[in-house]
Image (tube, helix red, strand yellow):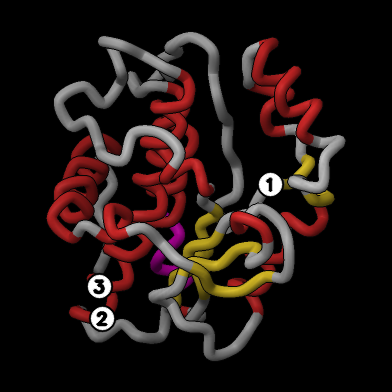
């Protein structure tokens, strides 16, 4: 269950592995963990659940292969959006690769927590973002952090879920409400981009999947 994340980092930061921090934590870190654990997951016919974000559609809607680290024109929101888009895209790419390899015992799901009152922004966002989200937490446009865990729990435990779906709150703007499948924008399932991203991730991390 890949849920760890940082968001809206005010200024460009580079991890010790040489990646922009949000891309490193939200995408490359999870990609590596999943790959290393895959033999055990496959052996137990287990599940992989990646916790994305509606942020995948609230900023840049592409992968900047020519400047993945945002050395030019860094913006906190676009960098975050790219990292969550990458995270979501590779789950659907994994589904295709598992199907092609006949490894149907492993299930992979993508979901998001909606607009939940967690500490995500307060731990990594700018002062202004902390103020904005602090005010949002007082509105009906957000839900308790506990509710934000429901989508990933559904994907981890519910039998016979549709892997091709994207799970999250189904209420107002998919920010709050009962959990279920809902729309995923086409750019998150661009097969050409997803395949290129997968190959790049294996090269960058030095980890190859046994798929």
The crowding category of the residue bearing disc 1, from other C-alpha atoms within 10 Å (few below 14, some 14 to 19, many at least 20), is many
**33 to the left or right of 145:** left
Label 2 SS: helix
| Residue contact at pointers 2 and 1, CB within 8 angstroms | no
The residue that label 2 is drawn on is 99
Image: magenta residue range: 36-41
Q: Tell whether position 45 is magenta.
A: no
The residue that label 1 is drawn on is 115
The residue that label 3 is drawn on is 96
> Is there any visible trace of residue 42 in the rendered image?
no
| Residue contact at pointers 3 and 1, CB within 8 angstroms | no
Percent x, y of residue 178:
72, 70
Q: Is residue 49 above or below residue 192?
A: below
Point 48% across, 38% down: residue: 26
Q: CA distance from mark 3 to mark 1?
A: 29 Å
Task: Name the image quarter holding residue 113.
Answer: bottom right
Task: Name the image quarter holding residue 132.
Answer: top right
Label 1 SS: loop
Lower sequence index among marks 2 and 1: 2
The crowding category of the residue bearing disc 2, from other C-alpha atoms within 10 Å (few below 14, some 14 to 19, many at least 20), is some
Between 37 and 22, the one lying in front of the other is: 22
| Residue contact at pointers 2 and 3, CB within 8 angstroms | yes
Point 30% across, 17% down: residue: 70
């Amino acid at each position: 269950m890949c849920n760890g994340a940082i968001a809206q980092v005010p200024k460009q930061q580079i991890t010790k592995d040489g990646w922009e921090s949000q891309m490193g934590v939200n995408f490359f870190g999870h990609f590596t963990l999943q790959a290393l654990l895959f033999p055990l997951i496959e052996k137990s016919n287990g599940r992989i659940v990646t916790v994305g974000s509606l942020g995948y559609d609230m900023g840049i809607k592409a992968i900047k292969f020519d400047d993945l680290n945002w050395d030019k024109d860094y913006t906190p929101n676009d960098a975050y959006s790219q990292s969550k888009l990458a995270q979501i895209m590779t789950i659907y790419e994994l589904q295709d690769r598992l199907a092609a390899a006949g490894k149907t015992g492993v299930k992979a799901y993508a979901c998001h927590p909606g607009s939940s009152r967690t500490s995500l922004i307060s731990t990594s966002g700018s002062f202004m973002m902390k103020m904005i989200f602090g005010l949002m937490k007082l509105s009906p446009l957000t839900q308790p952090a506990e509710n934000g865990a429901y989508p990933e729990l559904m994907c981890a435990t519910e039998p016979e879920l549709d892997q091709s779906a994207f799970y999250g709150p189904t209420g107002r703007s998919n920010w709050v409400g009962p959990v279920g499948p809902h729309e995923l924008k086409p750019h998150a399932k661009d097969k050409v981009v997803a395949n290129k991203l997968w190959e790049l991730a294996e090269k960058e991390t030095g980890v190859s999947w046994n798929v």
